[in-house]
Amino acid sequence: MKDGQRFPSRYLESYLLFGNLPGLYHEDTESWKNTLESYAELYIENEIRQENIVRDMGAFLRFLKIAALESGQFVNTTKLAKSVGVATNTVRNFYQVLEDTYVGIKILPFGRSRKRIISSPRFFIFDIGLRHILAELPINNTLLKLDPDHIFEQWVIIQI
């Protein structure tokens, strides 16, 4: 950056809706949603399709939408497998694909417990704006009003 130049300032709501992808800083805010949609299609879908990492792309795209909707929650591979219509091992493989391609991160539980839900990891899509696009959520202030705590928590964890 040149002397005296700073990154454009943004409001917290903007971060919570559109995420932190660096390319957004140099664009008009009106194009941010289109940029995120293009990123999801070009990088995520095409990258995985070109590498032939996934055999059943239709099942993977169904999984990706649900995984994005459940981003930040405890992972329940059995429930997700039923929703997508694939085997539980396939869902585990899909999560591994997301980790291998740096689309998401798995956070293991800190403590040990006999309760199953506490022993489950949590999975986060690496950018909150991308998460909204993959989950096909509307990117507007209504989204923040419906689920502010969950979205803010995800954004903070992704920043860390």
Image (tube, helix red, strand yellow):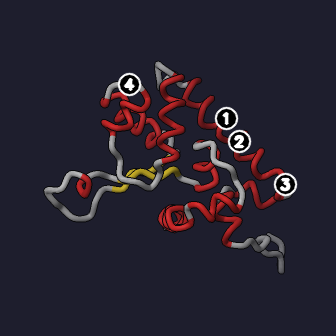
Q: Amino acid at mark 1?
A: Glu
Q: Position of residue 155 (x, y in %)?
A: 55, 64
State the residue at coordinates (55%, 61%): 147
State the residue at coordinates (84%, 54%): 30
Q: Which of the marked residues, 3 or 2, is nearer the chain's N terminus?
A: 3
| Picture disc at residue 86 | 4
Distance between the Cα atoms at labels 3 and 1? Answer: 19 Å
Q: Amino acid at mark 2?
A: Glu
Q: Are marks 1 and 4 in contact (CB under 8 Å)?
A: no
How many other residues sit within 10 Å of disc 4, few (<14), some (14-19) or many (≥20)? some
Q: Are marks 2 and 1 in contact (CB under 8 Å)?
A: yes
Residue that label 3 marks: 30
Above or below, 1 relative to 48: below
Q: Is residue 79 left or right of residue 151?
A: left
Q: Are marks 4 and 2 in contact (CB under 8 Å)?
A: no
| Picture disc at residue 41 | 1
Q: Which of the marked residues, 3 or 4, is nearer the chain's N terminus?
A: 3
Q: Is residue 159 left or right of residue 99?
A: right
